[in-house]
Amino acid sequence: MRCRTPARNRHSRHSRRNPRTRTRGTALAAVAALALSAWIPASAGAAESPAAARPGDVVSSAPSAFHPLPGQPTNTRAWKIHYRSTTADGAPNLVSGTVIVPQDGRTGPRPLITYAVGTVGMGDSCAPSSNFPRGTGLEANLIQQLTLRGWAVVVTDYEGLGTPGVHTYTVGPSAGHAVLDAARAAQRLPQAGLSPDGPVAIVGYSQGGQAGSWAAELQGSYAPELQVKGTATGGVPADLLKVADFNNGSYGSGLIFMAAAGQDAAFPELDLDSYLNPAGRLLVAGMKENCVAIDAIAGSFKRISDLTTRNPLAQPDWQARLNQSRLGRTAPAAPVYQYHALADELIPYGVGRQLRSEWCAKGADVEFDTVWVGEHVSGVITRSPHVGNWLADRFAGRPTHGNC
């Protein structure tokens, strides 16, 4: 199925045909570059590299802090970074994140976890890098379990979350790039002291499960130099159309509209606003400024038809874009531990099982774990210790126990 050429791509082709337009475009690009450089924090540290051009290059860094709870001390150092990455359409962008390194005197290569958080919201204040210093990061306690093992952790904020623009929520290729480039950036940050060829693992749940799984699928072609030893992802929304159908009119229906806003941010030609009625516009505008607790309440138990004049998800261009974020087309090169709660009320268990089946059919080394008791949120909490143990086995080079 073919989707419309994005508006920005049509403009770029016109620029190549018309020299006058090309000159004007160059001037606009220069203005944009000046605006971007003005936005980068003045507190950027010694790692600043204005000429950075490669995905994963650090553009700026500044000391930060990592507190799992307000004021809780940790034996870590942290830096907020801005680094180069790539949009879903392959254009360069700038993403922020946090690098966290235990201060335990360890020598030799230190394992690095590139960690993708679950849904926090679309407002810039929801970004993990904004919450770690205050002790209000939603998954900080899970991250602490990893740093207590002596592993460094880098947490991406994703595209548009804490940086200019709207967060491209649920756009899988963008998120996968951000997760992989966060690992590159952490290894290139001099203060972190990480080896460029040290062992790496990918971790994520829910939205982070999608992002981490996309990173696993992309790693072989996008970041083959990373020494990825394994990927642990859970509650993975591998098929967004099936997830939307499952949540329509239910407790998680607000997530449908967050996802639509995220897709529209990445692909403006989708023109989400043209499908929304006044109530829908009000809801989506609020989502772009708030965090997930408010969004979940505001959007719960709404049907798509309650907030639209016609259903965008029934349109071919929307279906094509959502299917671009569908997982299962490429086998991850490194072993995978994938887990899913049987009673997950947000991401259907069958979606997780289907991803497992598709990866297995392509020859991936997958250990699939059904969480028999619990729901979506408890799934990540109860399996967190096992994730740590599984990763420790991968770093130690122990045999896997795939169950395809």
Image (cartoon, rainbow, N blue to C red):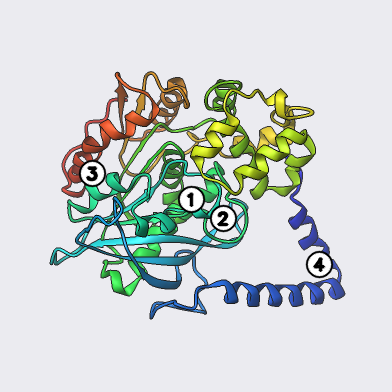
Residue at mark 1: 126
Dots 1 and 4: beta carbons under 8 Å?
Answer: no
Q: Position of residue 7 (x, y in %)?
A: 77, 53
Q: What SS does tag 4 mark?
A: helix
- Element assignment for label 1: helix
In this orientation, does residue 338 appear?
no
Q: Position of residue 146 (x, y in %)?
A: 24, 49
Q: Secondary structure at mark 2?
A: loop
Front disc: 2 or 1? 1
Amino acid at the residue labelled 2: Gly
| Disc 1 residue crowd, few under 14, some 14–19, many 20+, Cα 10 Å | many
- Name the N-terminal-most of marks 4 and 2: 4
* Element type where label 3 sits in the image: helix
Disc ID at residue 15: 4
Three-letter residue code for mark 3: Leu
Q: Residues within 10 Å of mark 2 (few under 14, many from 20)?
A: many
Earlier sequence position, callout 3 versus callout 1: 1
C-alpha separation, residue under disc 4 versus residue under disc 3 = 49 Å
Would you say the residues marked 4 and 2 are in contact, meaning their CB atoms lie under 8 Å apart?
no
Q: Residue furthest front?
A: 71
Circle 2 residue: 160
In the figure, is residue 351 to the left or right of 112? Answer: right
Mark nearer the viewer, 4 or 2: 2
Q: CA distance from mark 3 to mark 1?
A: 28 Å
Cα–Cα span, label 2 and label 1: 11 Å
- Which comes sooner in the sequence, label 2 or label 3? 2
The amino acid on which the numbered mark 1 sits, given as a three-letter code, is Cys
Q: Quadrant of residue 98?
A: bottom left
